[in-house]
Amino acid sequence: MTNENHNNQEKDNMNEKKIKVRTEKKSSLSDFVKRPLPSDEELNNFENSVKESGRNEEIEQNLSDIYKDKKGEMVDVSKLKIKAKKGFLYKMFRLIFILAFIFALAYLAYWYLYEANVDSKNIDLRVKGPESVMSGERFTYTVEIFNASDTEVLDMQLDMNYADNFIFIDSSKTTDNANNSWYLGDLAAKERVQFDITAMIIAQSGTPNPSQAILTYMPGNFSSQFQEIVDINTLVESHGFNVDFDYLSTALVGETHEVSMLFAQEDKNYINSFDLKIESPENIEILLPKKESEDESDLQIMSQERNTYRINGFDRKYNTQELKFRYRVKEKINDEEFLKFIFLQNVDNREYEFLIKNIDLQIMKSDLNLNLIINSSKNGEPVNFNENLNYTLNYQNKGEVTIEDLTIMLVVDSDLVDFDNIKDENNGVIGSNTIAWSKEQIPDLAEIKTEEEGNINITLPIKEFQERYIGQDLEITSYAQFSMKENDESDDNQDNRSNEIINKLNSDLDLEERILYFNEENIPVGSGPLPPQVGETSIFRVYWQINNNLHDLEDLLVELKLPEYISYEGVKNIDTGKLNYDSQSRKIVWDIGNLSATQHNVLAEFEISLNPDNNDEDKILILSQGAQVSATDTVTGDILSVESEATTTKLEEDEVANLSSDGRIAP
């Protein structure tokens, strides 16, 4: 029998047995007993199979987890990006960041637990005092400390760091050390302590003087000290008086020269005496000062030490008090030298400076002393358009021999003067911005003996203002120079020029006043009869227009005093500032204050009225004597003043009114 047939027979026999098992109704136990037991080899194979199957499933499960993204979807392995492993620097910066974060948390915790709970801002320190004072004026700082917290404050100590020119005078509370330290002890919750410090400051005008108050204290429930600091700044607005220096800017070697100081006190002045120290180079000798006559000054001068003098006796009853200092140049070392005038006040053996003035000198070495003066001033004073410059040239022979054939020339370096209208009685030779005189024009210049002197006087008008001047730095520079016949004893190194004077031009401030019944459009802006009628009220409109182009102005004020028979009816329009009427002084005042050069043609309008009586019949009455405008030029420092023309009932500026009225009061 073949193997295939044998296998088929065995399968058939097994099928038969299976059928029999299913059909027989025997217990499962008997069935189990009859089953053949597996061999050891079969058991080992079975266990290996189970383990292999479990491992494969675990691997598949792990790979599936690895290749899934955050959404649970499978990742395309071909597109995976491999990230580089973090290096040392990354780990170091990460560590630094973590440490910084921990430190910040610790600081915040400390601030919250200690600082925030203490809340030093609940300790309120204030120092009240004036923002500005006069030099030498007594004033008061009021120190106030308020404990706004809910806890007691212990061991309070206040220390003041004063400005350099601060002078302590007194305090309402006793100080502990050097007048700048106070132990204030303890302060209960919601209580305050206050005291005053009296002092003064002596310093230069316009200088800030910063001080500082430092309060040190300890809260009652804490063991650390805290501080509150307050800054105080007091400005010195003025030293109380004006001083003008008048001197020649040239100094001839060997000659004695004067520096004149004119003192004028302001409304408030707390400095009645001071020390004046004059610093000079070694080649300039300071001579004893002198004052003017007793009728013009109460000044007292006492010499303190070399070139230092005590000045007493300021008195407001004088408009000005003059003091003259003299000096002499012993030799010429430099072309230019300067003298320094230092004004000091001595308090408790300490000197405080409040004014310093330098005088620049041009040192000249010449046998001829030639000086130039303009408008009676040796220095350059501000001038106005359409005014005159009055020149005086003074010459004197300071040498030991006679000067022959002297020629003097005036140089005016500016096109602002009108040489076509010069006034010169000596008929000098006019050149390009020059005019010269020799013995042909002035015979005395042919020979000038030792110590002999003379003067040349001329007048040069300044041109009127022109729009092309706007934006320019306008000034007139003048000086004189000379030439003479040489002689054997003359020095080739001698100087031949006078002092130089620079006159700055003031701004072109102008005031136009018009009083109208009809305006430019022939529309009535007034009311009542025209011409004015006895017993009837006529109202007129007044127009003020300020014109200014060159410089900014300060303290600009327009004033008009009304006649007794004129009434003020009120303001109608104003561009800037305030316009008020004072019934006591009968003055209309337009207070503008500061005015920029860019503000052109500033206007104000108001109304006035007239009710004539029988005595005014057939008369022409004055409505306005003319308003006056004043201001300070911020560039030149000069005080400007301009007055408008008077206006009558003829209404000179009203063309329409002039057609129907001659201005006489009608019955």
Image (cartoon, grey):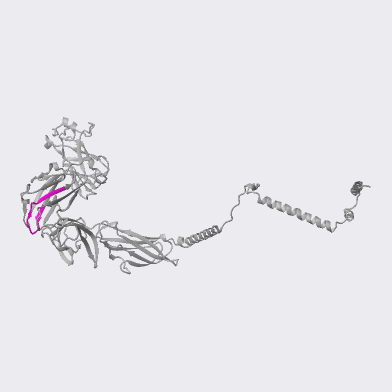
The structure residue drawn at horizontal position 7% and vertical position 49%, both measured from the top left corner, is: 439
Q: Nearer the viewer, residue 267 or 262?
A: 262
Q: Which secondary structure is most common in the magenta stretch?
A: strand
For residue 477, say whether it is visible.
yes
Q: Nearer the viewer, residue 600 or 196?
A: 600
Query: In this picture, is 162 found above or below 447?
Result: below
- Is residue 319 toward the left or the right of residue 1 in the image? left
Q: Which residues are magenta?
A: 394-411
Q: Position of residue 466 (x, y in %)?
A: 21, 40
For residue 126, say whether it is visible.
no
The structure residue drawn at horizontal position 29% and vertical position 56%, both measured from the top left corner, is: 131
Query: In this picture, is 530 found above or below 582?
Result: above
Determine the residue located farthest toward the right in the rendered image.
1
Q: Position of residue 580 (x, y in %)?
A: 24, 44
Q: Position of residue 229 (x, y in %)?
A: 37, 61
**Is 407 in the magenta?**
yes
Determine the residue located farthest toward the front in the rendered image.
488
Determine the residue located farthest toward the bottom in the rendered image.
176
